[in-house]
Image (cartoon, rainbow, N blue to C red):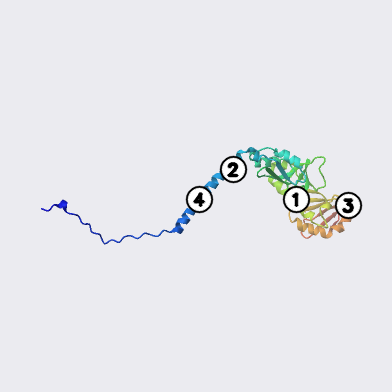
């Protein structure tokens, strides 16, 4: 028998090809390394920036208010606005409730809107929109009303009275029917605005605007207090008709009982003395 242990095993090489080494893509490796570096740097910057912000925030003195600016109010003094705001120098800018401060400032009847803004790191800016009176409304007491028909202030002894007077409404009507009262006041302000831009018959010729819930609006002339019946609506065309003849009527105002503009394409004038009618 053959001694199998003594036999040498002969290994044969197969027919497989030896794999070739792939060339390295140095461009791809460079881009990958660059992305890793940028990411690492960005993280470091974020961490550093966060640390810096945290340090600044923790430094209370850095954000203590040292300046408060108030944008050019006309009627309300800067001191009154600052007093209403209750902002004090030395406060932290982060302790401010901006909306609440704005509402406090708007408690002044002359202020229609107040805006408060932080200007980092240590400044606060306040800007206000003030109301402009366009008429004096009689409600038992006298009040100012603005362009929108908003009644906003009870008149005080030193307030000006040289505005058109609006009558015919009362406090009870305003409380019971606020939407209708507001609509009537807005129409009244629209009529007064129309008058303010006219040349032949304008606000200088009017002493009072009366509101009647049934018959509509009535103007009273400054000279003689002659009623001019405007009714409801189409005020512009009615005033156009009146302007065409008003300068002829003006010398005779003291003799007139009323002027009626409610008839289409007519100006009806009633004389006080005889009760006769003239049509223009």
Does dot 1 land on a helix, a strand or a loop?
helix
Residue 234's x, y, as percent? 74, 56
Image position of 170 (left or right of 251): left
Does dot 4 land on a helix, a strand or a loop?
helix
Residue behind mark 1: 189
Which of pointers 1 and 2 lies earlier in the amino acid sequence?
A: 2
Q: In the image as oriented, which residue stretches furthest toward the left?
A: 1
Which of pointers 2 and 4 lies earlier in the amino acid sequence?
A: 4
| Cα distance between the residues tagged 1 and 3 | 27 Å
- Who's the residue at 80% across and 59% down the image? 241
Residue behind mark 2: 53
Which quarter of the picture shows residue 240? bottom right
Asked whether the viewer can see residue 244, the reply is yes
Residue 119's x, y, as percent? 67, 45
Which quarter of the picture shows residue 26? bottom left
Image position of 185 (left or right of 275): left
Sort mark 2 into few (<14), some (14-19) or many (20+) by Cα contacts within 10 Å: few
Q: Are marks 2 and 4 in contact (CB under 8 Å)?
A: no
Quarter in which the C terminus is drawn? bottom right
Residue behind mark 3: 254
- Who's the residue at 46% across and 54% down the image? 32
Residue behind mark 4: 39
User: Of tags 1 and 4, which is closer to the observer?
Assistant: 4
Sort mark 3 into few (<14), some (14-19) or many (20+) by Cα contacts within 10 Å: some
Q: Are marks 1 and 4 in contact (CB under 8 Å)?
A: no
Does dot 2 land on a helix, a strand or a loop?
helix
| Cα distance between the residues tagged 1 and 2 | 54 Å
| Cα distance between the residues tagged 3 and 4 | 91 Å
């Amino acid at each position: 028998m053959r001694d199998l242990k003594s036999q040498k095993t002969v290994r044969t090489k197969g027919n497989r090809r030896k794999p070739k080494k792939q060339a390295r893509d140095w461009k791809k490796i460079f881009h990958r390394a660059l992305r890793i570096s940028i990411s690492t740097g960005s993280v470091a910057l974020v961490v550093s920036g966060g640390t810096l912000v945290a340090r600044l925030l923790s430094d209370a003195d850095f954000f203590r208010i040292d300046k408060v600016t108030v944008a050019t109010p006309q009627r309300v003094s800067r001191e009154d606005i600052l007093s209403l705001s209750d902002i004090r120098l030395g406060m932290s800018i982060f302790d401010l409730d901006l909306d609440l401060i704005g509402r406090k400032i708007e408690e002044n009847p002359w202020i229609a809107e107040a805006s408060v803004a932080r200007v980092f790191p240590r400044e606060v800016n306040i800007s206000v929109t003030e109301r402009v009176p366009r008429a004096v409304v009689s409600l038992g007491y006298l009040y100012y009303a603005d362009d929108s028909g908003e009644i906003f202030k009870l008149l005080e002894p030193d307030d000006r009275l040289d505005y058109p007077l609006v009558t015919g409404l009362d406090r009870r009507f305003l409380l019971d029917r606020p939407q209708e009262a507001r609509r009537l006041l807005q129409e009244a302000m629209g009529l007064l605005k129309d008058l303010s831009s006219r040349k032949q018959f304008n606000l200088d010729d009017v002493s009072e605007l009366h509101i009647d819930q049934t018959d509509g609006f009535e103007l009273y002339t400054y000279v003689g207090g002659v009623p001019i019946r405007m009714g409801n609506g189409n005020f512009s065309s009615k005033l156009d008709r009146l302007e065409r003849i008003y300068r002829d009527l003006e010398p005779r105002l003291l003799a007139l009982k009323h002027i009626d503009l409610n008839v289409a394409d007519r100006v009806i004038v009633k004389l006080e003395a005889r009760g006769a009618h003239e049509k223009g």
